């Protein structure tokens, strides 16, 4: 069933939500659509929130927690170190502009793209994701676990990591998986063309600051 959304956005502070009619509230001056497009999301205000759209459903996430950012930074760093040795891709982090269809635009927390595509320095040339990692927050859990996870599977992303820093686990999803593999000790990734796999001890990822 299509999610109905309308444009009454500045007061949203509670994560990915279904947008309902805000009669009498502050409107943004555009007609209420039945679904959002990537271009509409790009036109939204830069107000500190993350705006994404998946199959026309708008997802709004407030600024992340400090612990979320710490884990995201650690994950980016270890992947960057690995990919400097194994030149099979390039790691990036949100904010981003990944759009494979007019009604979809996502901003993964951490993701790896092919070298030939990232060298163009254009978001529009990113047509494949080799790895995606989303770090859960209370405000993003529903979108990361369901809406975005299904889209990553549909898009054929080979590996999707759903990182739960509070539980200190990582769910590993592949395109055909109905259920994830849940890793509690060690995370392994074997990208095509690499001589050695990426291995990360989760105790190191989740250790206190």
Image (tube, rainbow, N blue to C red):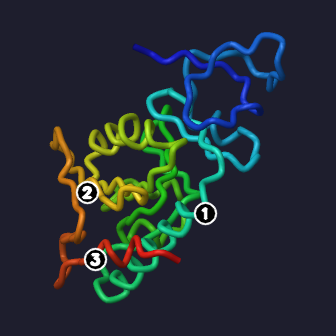
Q: Farthest bottom residue?
A: 85
Confirm or deny contact between disc 3 and disc 1 (CB under 8 A): no
Identify the residue shown where x is 63% and y is 35%.
14
Kindly indicate the quadrant of the structure image that contains residue 91: bottom left
Query: What residue would you read off at disc 1?
Result: 66
Secondary structure at numbered mark 1: helix
Q: Residue at x 51, y 53 (%)?
A: 124
Residue 60, image quadrant: top right
Residue ID at (46%, 34%):
54
Q: Is residue 25 above or below residue 90?
A: above
Quarter holding the N terminus is: top left
Q: Against 28, is 202 above or below? A: below
Left or right, 97 with respect to 40, comes to: left
Estimate how packed mark 2 is, as few (under 14), some (14 to 19) or many (20 or more) residues with alpha carbons within 10 Å. many
Residue identified by numbered label 2: 159
Q: Neighbour class for label 3 at 10 Å: few (<14), some, many (≥20)?
A: few
Q: What residue would you read off at disc 3?
A: 201
**Dot 3: element:** strand
- Image coordinates of residue 181 in percent, x first then y, are 18, 53
């Amino acid at each position: 069933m299509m999610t109905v959304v309308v444009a009454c956005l500045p007061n949203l502070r509670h994560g990915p939500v279904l947008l309902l009619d805000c009669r009498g509230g502050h409107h943004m001056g555009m007609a209420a659509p039945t679904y959002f497009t990537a271009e509409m999301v790009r036109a939204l205000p830069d107000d500190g929130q993350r705006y994404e759209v998946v199959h026309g459903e708008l997802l709004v996430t407030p600024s992340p927690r400090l612990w979320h950012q710490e884990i995201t930074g650690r994950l980016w760093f270890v992947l960057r170190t690995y990919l400097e040795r194994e030149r099979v891709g390039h790691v990036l982090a949100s904010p981003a502009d990944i759009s494979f269809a007019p009604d979809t635009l996502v901003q993964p927390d951490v993701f790896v793209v092919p070298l030939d595509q990232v060298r163009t320095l254009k978001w529009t040339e990113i047509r494949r994701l080799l790895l995606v990692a989303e770090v859960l927050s209370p405000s993003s859990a529903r979108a990361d676990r369901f809406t975005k996870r299904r889209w990553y599977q549909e898009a054929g992303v080979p590996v999707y990591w759903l990182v739960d820093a509070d539980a200190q686990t990582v769910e590993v999803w592949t395109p055909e998986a109905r259920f994830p593999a849940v890793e509690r000790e060690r995370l392994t990734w074997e990208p095509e063309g690499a001589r050695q796999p990426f291995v990360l001890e989760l105790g190191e990822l989740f250790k206190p600051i």
